[in-house]
Image (tube, helix red, strand yellow):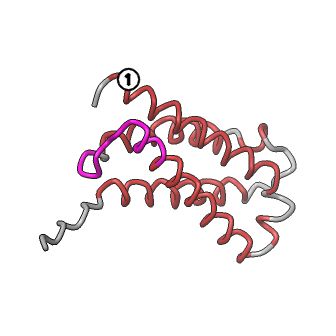
Amino acid sequence: MSKGDAFAYGIAGAITWLAVTAFYGAFGGGILESSFWFYVLNAAMATGAMLVAFCFTARLRRTSRRKRFFPALAFFLPGLIGGLLAVFNLDTLFPELEAVSQGRYAAFLVVGYLALIGLSLEKPAPRAHG
């Protein structure tokens, strides 16, 4: 992976994390945490957004499916660092959220990033020669 690829994946990951976190901050206390199913639906949508952003970046950078693990780490790292900082400062960033939101937000990010790592480890099926 080139430095340019690492930079592109890092920027894409940071933008995606910021968007997901801003959405959680805006709607977490009022809607998302009001019901278990709203929370699950939101976690699924956020995970989908992360995966789409990663796949879009991989397509733009022409990264083959077999070589997506290190790009996934570059995509993941800004969100991991930002997510940890946000979890420890969630009451300052989003004072309207309850204290229990720290764990919910952390779980929200963990689900998305585990799916991203799983996607990057998936190997494409061999093509049938016909």
Which residue is label 1 attached to?
Answer: 4
Give me the residue at 71% from left, 77% from top: 37
Give the position of the C terminus as an image quadrant.
bottom left
Give me the residue at 68% from left, 53% from top: 102
Give me the residue at 58% from left, 36% from top: 82
Residue range of the region highlighted in magenta in the rendering? 56-67
Give the position of the N terminus as an image quadrant.
top left
Q: Is residue 58 magenta?
A: yes
Q: In what element is the residue under mark 1? A: helix
Quarter of the image holding residue 128? bottom left
Q: Taking 44 as reference, is 2 above or below it?
A: above
- Neighbourhood count class around disc 1 (C-alpha, 10 Å): few under 14, some 14–19, many 20 upward: few
Q: Position of residue 47 (x, y in %)?
A: 56, 59
Q: In this orientation, which residue lies closer to the viewer: 44 or 53?
A: 53
Q: Taking 124 as reference, is 86 above or below it?
A: above
Q: In this orientation, which residue lies closer to the viewer: 7 or 129?
A: 129
**Left-right relation of 20 to 97:** left
**Left-right relation of 12 to 19:** left
Mark 1: which amino acid? Answer: Gly
Q: Is residue 23 magenta?
A: no
Q: Position of residue 78 (x, y in %)?
A: 51, 35
Q: Position of residue 28 (x, y in %)?
A: 78, 57
